[in-house]
Amino acid sequence: MQGITEDIARIGAAPPSAAAAARLGAAIGVLLQIAAYRFEADSTTAATIIAAVKAQAGPIAKLPPKTRKILESVSAGQGHALAARPAKMSMAHAVLFHAGCKQPPFGKREPALFATRPGAAYVQEVVRRCIKMIDEDFADASNWSDLCREGVGMGALAPLVVLKPYRLPVRKLQSWRRKAKLGIAELEANEDEELSFHRKYHANLDRIFALLLRRLSR
């Protein structure tokens, strides 16, 4: 997810504070769910993450025990092992994002990292970035019938399925879904030579929209 590791670097460079530590915990929590590779030992981002945690060590020491334990484990280089723990998700939903996967392609959510007001606010900030990326895909109607190639922001739907808490207007989600359906309808009308491929892609996409609508309606 673009921007999160940059956020972590900025937090690490900021003066230590309770708000910064809480925001850092949330940023790390998001990466644990959606970007395990960021914690790999040979990754430059892993060093950035560890440095940020060490820089905020003072206020982190005052966080609740569960939160502190997770961040201390990340500081000790155990981030990748934490991120490797699979999320609780049915395989019927998991295969919508990664065909043929044997376990969910997302990491376990750690609620303690999002329990503070700054932590929850950070999740909403990430969600706003996701919304912007998806909006950009649907801004041009010519993309609607080729979202599998032109829809570079479609990948931002994945974080929306696993992140919480956040707010997203149902009408916006319904609008995205309607535009995607218009896109496949156009291909159906023109008997596109890749119609079978597009049907499968759009069927998966519609299931993801349905999943999100159910979640937001709770």
Image (cartoon, rainbow, N blue to C red):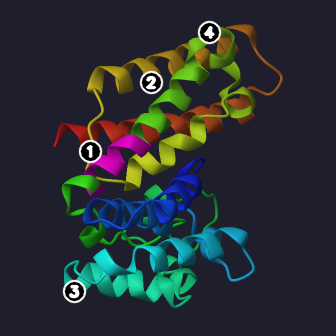
Residue 173 is left or right of residue 138, and the answer is: left
Expressed as whole percent of the image width and height from the top left, the position of residue 87 reads 41, 71
How far apart are the alpha carbons under marks 2 and 1?
15 Å
The residue beneath circle 4 is: 141
User: Which sits earlier in the primary sequence, circle 2 or circle 1?
Assistant: 2
What residue span does the magenta drawing correspond to? 119-126
Q: Residue at x 71, y 23 (%)?
A: 146
How far apart are the alpha carbons under marks 4 and 2?
13 Å
Which numbered tag is attached to residue 215?
1
Which numbered tag is attached to residue 65?
3
Task: Count residues near mark 4 (Cα–Cα under 10 Å), then give few for <14, some for 14-19, many for 20+.
Answer: few
Disc tally is 4
Q: State the SS at label 1.
A: helix
The residue beneath circle 2 is: 177
Expressed as whole percent of the image width and height from the top left, the position of residue 139 reads 57, 13
Q: Residue at x 37, y 27 (%)?
A: 173
User: Which sits earlier in the primary sequence, circle 4 or circle 2?
Assistant: 4
Task: Count residues near mark 3 (Cα–Cα under 10 Å), then give few for <14, some for 14-19, many for 20+.
Answer: few
User: Which sits earlier in the primary sequence, circle 3 or circle 4?
Assistant: 3
Expressed as whole percent of the image width and height from the top left, the position of residue 130 reads 48, 37
Q: Is residue 122 magenta?
A: yes
Could you tell me the amino acid type at mark 3?
Pro
Residue 51 is left or right of residue 151, and the answer is: left
